[in-house]
Amino acid sequence: MQQKTAWERVEIARNPNRKTALDYIERIFDEFVELHGDRMFKDDAAIVCGLAKIGKQNVTIIAQQKGRNTRENIKRNFGMPNPESYRKAIRFMKQADKFKRPIITFIDTKGAYPGIEAEERGQGEAIAKSMFEMSKLRVPVIAIVIGEASSGGALAISIANKIIMLENAVYSILSPEGYASILWKDSTMAKEAAEKMKLTAKDLYDFEIIDKIIKENNSDEADFEKIAEEMKKEIIKSIKQLKKLSEEELIENRYEKFRKIGEYKEY
């Protein structure tokens, strides 16, 4: 079978029919209860937060959520979080830390919302604060990249001890169109940009940026069941491994992981 190009994987990751975070949450976890609001402005539906169980383990879930049609996308702001989404996430990170619940995040966004209202409410500060708070959490954190994960909007909830990625997901500093616009002043060169950006799961695994790739065969329901089951096994296994570490070791593990990523000089 011919290997897919980076751009083909970008197109798959962006497919509006691709399974979303809520699809995986419903399939993998038991007793999911969604929680709302940042206690500062309002509830932003681009990030879903809540409590769930996986086996006998209580966990906190923080997930970026896209819509499948116009109405859903308007509700979810096309999966582009506003500052209040990140502040909501921080609120439940701290709650998980207090009650010693592992945190599972699902990453699927083209980036944080870039509108003027978001900037007025402190988008940059909210993203930075989210990363800062995640870096010092005393509980296991597992991030799962399920679709398109771009820019600081994705990084804001992916400072994790373990990063799992679906085979056809992509994870990058910005969109290929944005990269092409900066590098060549021509967004139509997005295909070429995608190849240079090293944004596929295989690229990122080779660079040791992610820890595990979950294979995808096709887009049918049977394959979704297999992917969800494999994801569930990885989550359970990862929690079991990470719970063996002390609080200080969890923080150090996360620090060393991202310090190593930052030391790469050439991609």
Image (cartoon, helix red, strand yellow):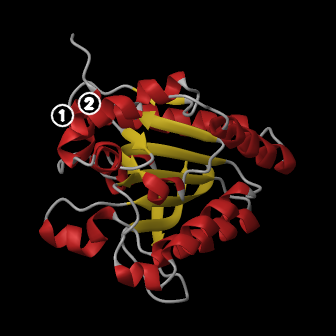
Distance, label 2 to label 1, CA atoms, is 6 Å
x then y, percent, for residue 127: 55, 66
Q: Is residue 259 left or right of residue 85?
A: right
| Callout 2–callout 1 Cβ contact below 8 Å | yes
Asked whether 41 or 126 is in front, the reply is 126
Q: Secondary structure at mark 2?
A: helix
Q: Is residue 191 left or right of residue 137?
A: left
- Which label is found at residue 141? none
Residue 126 visible, this angle? yes
Q: In the rendered structure, which amino acid carries the disc numbered 1? A: Asp
Image quadrant where one finds the N terminus: top left
Asked whether 35 or 9 is in front, the reply is 9
x then y, percent, for residue 19: 27, 47
Q: In the rendered structure, which amino acid carries the disc numbered 2? A: Asp
Q: Which residue is mark 2?
A: 223
Figure label count = 2
x then y, percent, for residue 142: 58, 45
